[in-house]
């Protein structure tokens, strides 16, 4: 039932422009009112929407894959994610982030 409700809610906001406009309006409202709870809720909604999309994608794949292959794929993805996280943690120290943000904020 929860997935159905979330699916209907997401479908109403499936248009990317409308979704971005809604998030921008909520963000502007939260900033102008100084409402940190609303700001956190906006972040949570954005992240949960992406998570639900991934789950729906996996649900579509699971019917065509053997369970063993699906589990191996998930495990391999987690290992690759961990490797990238560790590499990123060490490589980011070598990148002059200050200068990158300075150039990108112009």
Image (tube, rainbow, N blue to C red):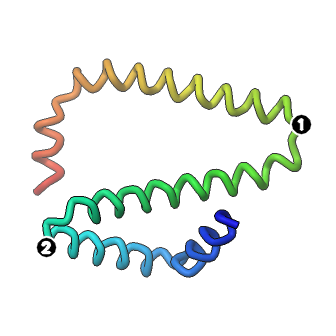
Mark 2 and 1 residues: CB-CB less than 8 Å, in contact?
no
Q: Earlier in the sequence, mark 2 or mark 1?
A: 2
Tell me which residue sits at (37%, 77%) in the image: 22
Q: Which residue is painted at 87% across and 49% down in the image?
A: 63
**Helix, strand or loop under label 2:** helix
On the image, numbered disc 1 is attached to which residue? 66
Q: Secondary structure at mark 1?
A: loop
Side of 105 where 15 appears, left or right: right
User: Image quadrant for the C terminus?
Assistant: bottom left
Closest to the observer: 24 or 30? 30
Q: Would you identify the image quadrant in which residue 7 lies?
A: bottom right
- Indicate which disc residue 81 carries: none
Q: Measuring from the top left, give residue 100's x and y in whole percent.
A: 17, 41
Q: Residues within 10 Å of mark 2 (few under 14, many from 20)?
A: few
State which mark lies toward you, 2 or 1: 2
Q: Residues within 10 Å of mark 1 (few under 14, many from 20)?
A: few
* Residue 92 image offset from top left, x and y in percent: 27, 26
Q: CA distance from mark 2 to mark 1?
A: 51 Å
**Residue 75 drawn at (x, y percent):** 67, 26
Q: Residue 53, percent across and down?
A: 61, 58
Q: Say left or right for 56 vs 64.
A: left
Q: Which residue: 72% across, 49% down? A: 58
Image point 21% across, 69% down: which residue?
30
Pointer 2 residue: 32
């Amino acid at each position: 039932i929860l997935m159905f409700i979330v699916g209907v809610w997401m479908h109403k906001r499936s248009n990317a422009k409308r979704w971005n406009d809604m998030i921008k309006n909520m963000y502007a409202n939260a900033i102008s009112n100084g409402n940190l709870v609303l700001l956190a809720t906006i972040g949570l909604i954005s992240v949960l929407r992406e998570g639900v999309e991934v789950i729906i994608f996996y649900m579509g794949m699971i019917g065509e894959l053997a369970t063993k292959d699906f589990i191996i794929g998930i495990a391999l993805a987690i290992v690759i994610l961990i490797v990238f996280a560790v590499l990123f943690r060490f490589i980011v120290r070598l990148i002059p982030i200050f200068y990158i943000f300075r150039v990108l904020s112009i």
